[in-house]
Image (cartoon, helix red, strand yellow):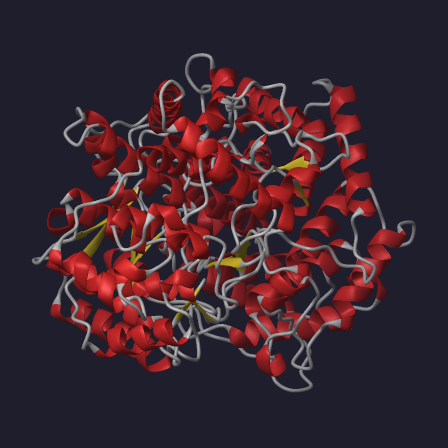
Amino acid sequence: MWRLKIGEGVDGPYLHSTNNYVGRQTWEFDPNYGTPELREEVDKARQHFWATRHHVKPSSDLLCRIQLLHEKNFKQRIPQVKVGDGEAISYETVTATLRRAAHYFGALQASDGHWPAENAGALFFLPPLVMLLYITGHLSTVFTPEYRQETLRYIYCHQREDGGWGLHIEGHSIMFCTAFSYICMRLLGEGPENNACSRARKWILDHGTVKAIPSWGKTWLSLLGVYEWLGTNPMPPEFWLLPSFLPIHPAKMWCFCRLVYMPMSYLYGKRFVGPITPLILQLRHELYDEPYEDIKWKSIRHLCAKEDLYYPRPFIQNCLWDACRILTEPLLSRWPLNKLREKALEVTMNHIHYEDENSRYINMACVEKVLCMLACWVEDPNGDAFKKHLARIPDYLWLGEDGMKMQSVNGSQVWDAGFAMQALIATDLTHEMGDTLKKGHDFIKKSQVKDNPCGNFKSMYRHISKGAWTFSDQDNGWQVSDCTAEGLKCCLLFSMMPSETVGQKMEPQELFNAVNILLSLQSKNGGLPGWEPAEASKWLELLNPTELFADVVIEHEYVECTSSGIEALVLFQELYPNHRTKEIETFVTKAVGYLEDIQSPDGSWYGRWGICYIYASWFALRALTSAGKTYNKCVTIRKAVDFLLKVQGNDGGWGESYLSCTNKKYIPPKGNHSNVVHTSWALMGLIHSGQGDRDPIPLHRGAKFLINSQLDNGDFPQQEITGLFNHSGMLHYPLYRNTFSIWALAEYRKSVPLSS
């Protein structure tokens, strides 16, 4: 049986941690683990997901929860309550619901204080790892039969009824993920006659074959040997030699984009191709509608299936790629300019090693991780760098009732814990949840980044990170503005509570370091970017080389990050009024102005990291009200309230489709049913605005929906996916259904007068 391990790892030649692996979460197969009853419960969870997979696409993350609840012998002992038609909600009813939810949620906390959970949902994360392991000859050693079984389970569970796979688990079928999933199944031992494979191959052939796969797919298929580099657009590693004064330079790129194309350009410069095995020759036959040797590769470089095309490349960009292919590449492959390519490959590889070392070989995210890992193997198949990468593969793999998946990052530990702590603090149940709060506080403190990247980090295009929090754990090393703001806010809230209950408060200097991170990131327009200062020209987005995503070339400002920064710094200034007072006041003023300036005409805000308009509106409202804005004196707040009230559902709750993100307008979910997560965000946004004083009826309706949605054990139902990246990619956060339902009901109980 599979078992989740928390905080385990031993420093050695290929594995290292900066804080004794706090936050690390890995799965291992233990044939001796688990009672017959526990195994039966796991099997039932898998069977139920399979039976309902076309109705609810995200998993409920039950395998992790089953283990944690079993180990703690959790039994829900607080009676369940419901609110009947025409019945007023009493204070006692809300309290009972909150206590049931909080005790259940507390039982899901890991021994090191974080809440283990999935952070996946995109269907292009895992196949490149399988391709990498196949190319390097490590597939059978890393993916044992148990891993293969669960990986195949995940692929099968998320195949769409038309035979394809979407960009994410709720998306329509596209060539990119259908081809990746098909290849993954074949590499894992499934034959072409397998039902899932035959349906997938038919979809591929019916939609133009892999000749129409997007550029990232063309790169990976070239590496695997089932596509030719001639059919890809150039990715010259000489890019890393450009002088910094040019408008196009690695330092001006968004960090995710920079770190993806860094190893891609190295591999392109090498024109690396994996071993051509009999299986690769079979795939060359299966993936096309004409003989492989007859394909005119140069003619399909710009070809992309219409199902995949979210960001059509402008004509000028295609002209640039063509010029690079015709003029630049032939010169760089011949003496004496081939010496420049050798230098470019050396410099690029130095950047790769720098990123590897500063993230303990976790890397920033999964796409970069696998590409950097392959680059290290190409440089030296027996080198330590590749072995260190191998040691960190388990950090990315997650197991649910729908199978084995690869996470976007090595988890969302800090992000989830920050919200979890604030939600539990808001319940005013400290006397019951003291141990949970103390452990969570300890995790947050231990997860703060203590140092900047090593050496001359600015020459490696890195920003300061000392004092920040990452999205996952300290070992990841990458500062994130909103994670830093939410982590700072948690520590400030805990500093106002008795230390004997929640543990010692964080040292002021460590709080000051976090403040420094936030102040260092603010843009001239007042907004806050995610990772690094947003200083590049917006026109560079015209060079977006991906067809699948938008706004990926440069760093941008975000509503969510800006809002979190406002709220954290306002609270900080209340507690430390003499520290960088003027700078913080200026930050807040400019940030509020940014939020007011980018509000949509309908009163909402477009969310960049959650779905979508409801999500961002909650962030903005909590920030504006924390900065002293009120409904009566702020038209921005009034417009936002009008939006939320307008989209409230007939059942009292709120919901929103992921299509809002791609279409950039609010779209209700299919069937107009409500979602507990969206309901919680909307409810809190309205509460922040003072809706309880104006007309509490919409709040009562929303709270009733949440109360009546609670399950027997204190959990809340898993519904549609709620996370987002780059407009078209969706992420699954299973903890959201617990965290935000608790938080919303806690705020409701505190802010809205209720009968006894």
Extreme residue in the top direction: 456
Look at the picture and state if 67 lies above or below 316. below
Total count of labels: 0
Q: Is residue 386 left or right of residue 637?
A: left
Instruction: Say whether residue 617 is left or right of residue 427.
Output: right
Quarter of the view holding residue 195: bottom left
Quadrant of image for the N terminus: bottom left
Left or right of residue 271: residue 449: right
Which residue extends farthest bottom? 85
**Of residues 366 and 649, the one drawn nearer to the viewer in this rendering:** 366
Residue 202 in the image: x percent, y percent? 32, 77
- Image-quadrant location for residue 387: top left
* Residue at left offset 46%, top offset 65%: 100
Q: Taking the image as drawn, is residue 73 in sight?
A: no
**In this rendering, position of residue 11 left or right of residue 417:** left
Nearer to me, 77 or 294: 294
Can residue 132 be seen here? yes
Find residue 59 and report its horizontal and vertical position in percent. Answer: 38, 67
Q: Give the percent coordinates (x, y) of residue 335.
A: 35, 20
User: Could you tell me which residue is drawn at 76 percent across and 34 percent down?
Assistant: 526
Residue drawn at point x = 59 percent, y = 38 percent: 530
Image quadrant in which the C terminus is located:
bottom right
Residue furthest out toward the left: 32
Q: Residue 19 appears at what percent x and percent y?
A: 33, 27
